[in-house]
Each structure stands twice: as structure tokens, then as C-alpha cells.
Amino acid sequence: MRETPRTKAVMPGLVPGIHDLSSRGKDVDGRDKPGHDELRERRNRRSPLTRFLMALPAAAVSFVFSSVPAFADLKICNRMSYVVEAAIGIDDKAATATRGWFRVDPATCRVVVQGTLTADRILLNARALGVYGASPIPQNGSDMLCVAQDNFVIAAARQCRSGQSQAAFTQVTPTQSADGNLIAYLAEDSEYDDEQARLAGIQRLLVIAGYDAAPIDGVDGPKTQAALAAFLKSRGLSSDIVGSQNFFKTMVDAVQTPSATGLTWCNDTQHKVMAAIATDDGKSVTSRGWYRIDPKTCLHPDVTGQPKQIFSFAEAVDADNRAVKLKDRPLNWGGDRQLCTRETKFETVEQTDCGARGFAATGFGAVDMSSGGKTLRFAVP
């Protein structure tokens, strides 16, 4: 299954909005919930120039170099509730190069270009870590450039070679900070400041790990604190680690370990795996995908409510997002229950006439959740 923008948005509240902050879009995540100590006032809106941000997939704008000092570093700052990996593209005299991936935690910045910067345009692509599930950050930039799955530098990025795939990059206009550096911001509709982005990022990972820290709103309170304390205790972590520089790495690593409750997918292969889940609530069956599971990692798909039955399908893909074959057969893990999927992101409650609706009938396997938790391990036979 291809890791491309999925055609139907995933569950409400999980997809970052696409807008310049000057558009004053409506918030996605709620900011009022029982248990809050105090609802912080939103910070005053800055001017469109000083608050310009590259919202994922980002608004397309021009990059102006005439007023930019040549010695300035270029930074990417993350005001999203996701840990992201970013790639940059440099257009210079009709040649285009790309480089990635730069990991940027919520409420932090990362230098992606140091010193002299000579280019006609700067482009940016970003993706959420696989731990967040069904591709929560869509990409729809107008420049299709080459990337690789792991860290890469590609000198001629408009013609992809083996092991490379095309990704949508968006032209961006960084702002100039007081120290002369250039900054491009990543943001979502909720318009978090740094403090809110960090807390919302913690809340989001707590929810994925199965702790009740919802809604994801960047506002602190007893409910969030109780969920965080329970998470730290269950993982044997000290509360001091919350303020550490590597806290998000520690938290992501902990979330990706198999859990005693809920469903966990673990990828024991050397390939990337794309997975889909389906839930039967007794009235209808909803299928949803795709979730990216990187090699040697685990993932907890989001399951809401108390479904009567859970189904799973997964398929290994190569660097070009083509199905991996073993003895001329696709390397996948499923079953006999035919449910609807498609190549791009999807969520559907209709499970009949898949082909007529632009879907494909795919064999899912039932997951035995009678013990309260189940870990499915994907391995090469």
C-alpha cells in the first residue's frame, strides 16, 4: 500500500489544518474540558508577517531573498502536537536538491541549513512519526521532489532513482528573527504557542498509549496530570524526565513498546509495513488506514469505544511503496473477512460493492481481544 495522501481525512480532530495564521481559522481541538485548573488566555495574534508559518502541508508562498542576510541559519520550529520529520528542498539556478530527515519535537527548533544560503526558492515537506497512525499530516504541495525513507541527501531531486520516491514539497517564506536567523514554523489549526504545543504533544502520546488525556488541547489540568503520572509509573519513569530535552524521544519509545491492553502491531521485518484496522460495533463495520509501521517498531492503532470485534490487515512495502513479494506473492498479514480498502488514506463504514465505490476488497483477519490485549507481530515466514 502506498504511503501517499489518503483521500478521506482520518478521525475529526486528528488532521492539522492548512492555513496561514492570518486566515483566523477555527480551532480544531477543544480548549475547555472538565478538570482544567485554569483556561489560559490565548496569546494575542501576531501580524501575518511575524507569525507566518508553514502549516502542513503548508500554504504556498514565495521566498524573498533580497532582504535576507546571506549568513543566516535556516531553522524549522514546530508548534504542532506531533513529533515531525522534515525535509528541505533547495532550488538554485534550475537545479534542485533535497535533504532530510530532520526530527523536530513539539515546541523546539532545528537548524536545517547553516551559514551562507544561496537559493532561488526554499521548499519544505514534513511527516509525522509512524506512532501517530493513519497519516495525520497530509501533503499537497505543488513540487514533487525525491526523498528516501531514511536520512538522505539527493543532489538531483526531480528525477528519482531506485530507493527514492516522490513527495510533495511546498514553497515557504521563512521570517527573520531578531538574531538574523530565518525561521519557518510548522503549525496546525489550533494555533498553539510553544507551551501549548508541548503539552498537546504530551497529551496526544498519552491518548495513543491508552491514557485518558483527551481532548488534545494544550491546556493543563488534573486530568492530564493524572494520565501523565499513571503513564510514567507504568513505564518506571521518574517525573523529572518530563522536563528533559529528550522527553519526547523517551515517550515515543515507551509508547511503541507492546502493551498489555488494546491492540499492538509490531513490525519484525526489515521492510516498512502499512496496516489497516476495522472495528465492528454490532451495527456496522468501519475500516480505516493506512498506518505506517517502520521496521523493528511497534504501533498502537487508535480504537475508540468498545467494539465487539477488531480486524487487521497489513502489507510490507519497499522504498518505492510497492508491495514486497515473497515467492511471487505479496508479503501481507490478514485473513478471510473481505472489507473495503484503497491505496490512499481511507475510512469507510460501507463494506459492500467495494469495487464500484473505488475501493478494493481486502482480506482482514479477526483479532482475539478476549484477554484485553493483543500484540500482532509481522514477520517474514
Image: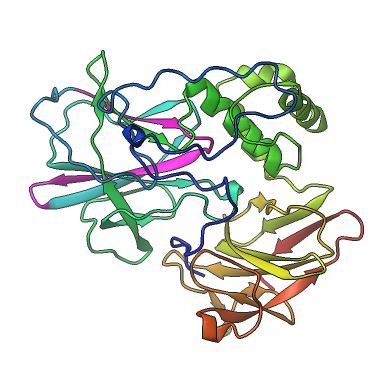
On screen, 328 above or below 54? below
Given residues 321 and 67, the one toward you in this image is: 67
Residue occupying image coordinates x 77% and y 31% = 231
Residue occupying image coordinates x 67% and y 51% = 298
Q: Where does the image place residue 58, in percent across and percent down from the top left?
A: 34, 44
Residue occupying image coordinates x 30% and y 31% = 52
On screen, 26 above or below 44? below
Colour setting: rainbow
Q: Where does the image place residue 294, in percent across and percent down from the top left?
A: 57, 54
Given residues 269 and 247, the one toward you in this image is: 247
Residue occupying image coordinates x 14% and y 22% = 69
Which span of residues is magenta-colored? 72-94
Q: Where does the image place residue 147, in percent across and percent down from the top left?
A: 35, 55
Would residue 80 be seen by someone viewing this image from the given angle? yes
Horizontal side, residue 18 vs residue 338: left or right: left
Would residue 254 be seen by someone viewing this image from the given angle? no
Residue 67, located in which quarter of the rendered image?
Answer: top left
Q: Main secondary structure of the magenta part?
A: strand
Residue 186, located in which quarter of the rendered image?
Answer: top left
Horizontal side, residue 176 vs residue 282: left or right: left
On screen, 286 above or below 263? below
For the image, the number of numbered tags is: 0
**83 magenta-colored:** yes
